[in-house]
């Protein structure tokens, strides 16, 4: 299988912030055997590589001089065992299309994760989560290419070391393990999860007491569409900062100072703070800095309505981080992966 290598490609349509950075080379991987070949191309030319899915969780700080490997592998394999459905899904499948397809087939579990942009292969990287469900609740294993061992490997759920918007792919296996497929464990039986207040309120307001999985997905889609900008019309990368999780002592100090603090107690005894609330308190919601800004309805979402650069976005992020730190002594961490030439 020959590789199609494109030179000097604009990445503007390949990232949801619509940052017009250029890459040195772009290779689309649509067949498994192309992946080691693409990696070999980067190695022979001594170039850094960037593995790209839907580009909805990255910030391109500068032009990328290396090789972008765009994962467009497709295909779903189904294995039904009793009430359990095991799905092997290729990394390049679109996440939301998968959620919709599963609902049509009567394979349940993904409802709360509807309308998350991006690919299936990127979902384990930050253990995507929304409305009270995280990927780790549904993932059986992950298969991919280990660049160090130069072989195909399968990792169990435990080996993925999932955490809050976190996994082993952000740490020990960062830039080392390239996911080519994900195995999910779904069910033929509906088991809706309604522990997220906004979701349960939405259904209750409509007198839906025992919602079907389809109704849950529809509710999630409607809530998301009412609050979050669609990257196709207003470029953004979703939540730009992680919700900080802090100790009891730090929490008690803050709550005394700020009685209206928005927080969620965690199973491990710590407290998760709503980063959006912190940003809102600093007055950044709806404000702009040069070409970029903070969304009017959702203070966690940075937007690029014009021709903003990656540096513009990072400058805005830094100003927000500084103001949050000055007011609350909390360091906000950027959620999307930032790529800059210096860091590669
Ligand atoms: P990319 O942006 O292409 O890549 C992200 C990172 O993963 C990069 O470091 C990349 O190198 C790496 N990567 C990608 N594919 C692979 C692969 N096959 N193997 C190894 N590494 C890979 N996230 C949530 O968790 N919950 C949400 O509710 C949510 N909502 C969002 C809403 C909006 C409007 C937007 C824009 C984003 C949202 N996100 C959310 C963030 C984002 O959609 C997810 O993180 C998604 O999984 C990223 O997928 P992607 O294919 O676009 O990844
Ligand atoms: P929201 O519902 O307005 O809630 C604000 C924050 O409070 C969320 O970040 C959420 O944390 C937390 N929260 C709310 N209710 C909670 C509960 N019952 N238990 C624990 N935590 C609770 O947030 P939103 O921005 O509109 O997003 C809705 C959901 O979609 C959230 O789960 C969010 O993570 C997800 N989302 C993620 C991204 C992204 O890029 N990562 C973008 C858009 C939406 P959690 O974030 O931990 O859930």
Image: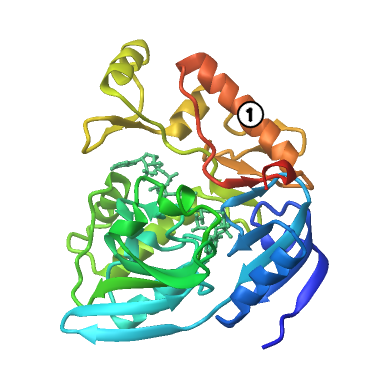
Residue 124 place in picture, x, y as percent: 42, 59
Residue 277 place in picture, x, y as percent: 44, 30
**Circle 1 residue:** 318
Residue drawn 77% across the image and 66% down it: 25
> Looking at the picture, does residue 265 appear above or below residue 308?
above
**Which quadrant holds residue 10?**
bottom right
Q: Is residue 273 left or right of residue 66?
A: left
Q: Is residue 156 left or right of residue 151?
A: left
Quadrant of the snapshot with the N terminus:
bottom right
What is the basis of the colouring in this image? rainbow
Residue 161 place in picture, x, y as percent: 34, 52
Q: Callout 1: few (<14), some (14-19), or many (20+) C-alpha neighbours within 10 Å?
A: some
Residue 292 in view of the camera: no
Residue drawn 28% across the image and 67% down it: 109
Residue 247 place in picture, x, y as percent: 30, 24
| Viewer-side residue, 65 vs 322 | 65
Q: Return the residue found at the far right.
A: 8
Q: Is residue 257 left or right of residue 122?
A: left
| Viewer-side residue, 129 vs 49 | 49
> Looking at the picture, does residue 265 appear above or below residue 24?
above
For mark 1, give the secondary structure. helix
Quadrant containing ligand 2? top left
Residue 17 in view of the camera: yes
Query: Under 8 Å from ligand 2: the CB of mark 1?
Result: no
| Viewer-side residue, 18 vs 173 | 173
Q: Is residue 95 left or right of residue 262?
A: right
């Amino acid at each position: 299988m020959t590789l199609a290598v494109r030179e000097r490609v604009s990445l503007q349509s390949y990232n949801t912030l619509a940052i017009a950075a250029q890459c040195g080379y772009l290779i689309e991987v649509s067949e498994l055997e192309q992946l080691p070949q693409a990696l070999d191309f980067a190695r022979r030319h001594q170039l850094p590589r960037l593995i790209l899915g839907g580009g909805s969780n990255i910030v391109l700080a500068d032009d990328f001089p290396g090789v972008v490997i765009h994962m467009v592998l497709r295909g779903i394999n189904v294995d039904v065992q009793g009430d359990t459905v095991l799905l092997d899904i290729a990394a390049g499948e679109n996440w939301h299309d998968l959620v919709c397809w599963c609902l049509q087939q009567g394979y349940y579990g993904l409802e709360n994760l509807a309308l998350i942009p991006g690919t299936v292969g990127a979902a384990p990287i930050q253990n995507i989560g929304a409305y009270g469900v995280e990927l780790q609740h549904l993932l059986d294993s992950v298969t991919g290419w280990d660049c160090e061992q130069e072989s195909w490997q399968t990792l169990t759920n435990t080996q993925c070391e999932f955490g809050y918007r976190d996994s082993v792919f952000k740490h020990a296996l960062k830039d080392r393990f390239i996911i080519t497929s994900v195995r999910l464990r779904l069910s033929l039986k509906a088991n809706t999860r309604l522990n997220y207040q906004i979701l349960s309120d939405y259904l209750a307001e409509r007198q839906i007491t025992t919602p079907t999985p389809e109704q849950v997905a529809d509710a999630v889609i409607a809530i998301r569409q009412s609050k979050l900008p669609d990257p196709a019309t207003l470029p953004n990368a979703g939540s730009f900062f992680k919700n900080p999780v802090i100790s009891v002592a730090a929490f008690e100090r803050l709550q005394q100072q700020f009685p209206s603090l928005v927080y969620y107690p965690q199973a491990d005894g710590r407290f998760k703070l709503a980063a959006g609330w912190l940003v809102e308190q600093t007055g950044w919601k709806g404000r702009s800095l040069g070409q970029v800004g903070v969304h009017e309805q959702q203070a966690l979402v940075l937007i690029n309505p014009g021709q903003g650069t990656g540096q513009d976005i990072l400058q805005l992020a830094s100003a927000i981080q500084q103001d949050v730190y000055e007011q609350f002594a909390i360091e906000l961490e950027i959620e999307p992966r930032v790529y800059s030439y210096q860091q590669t």
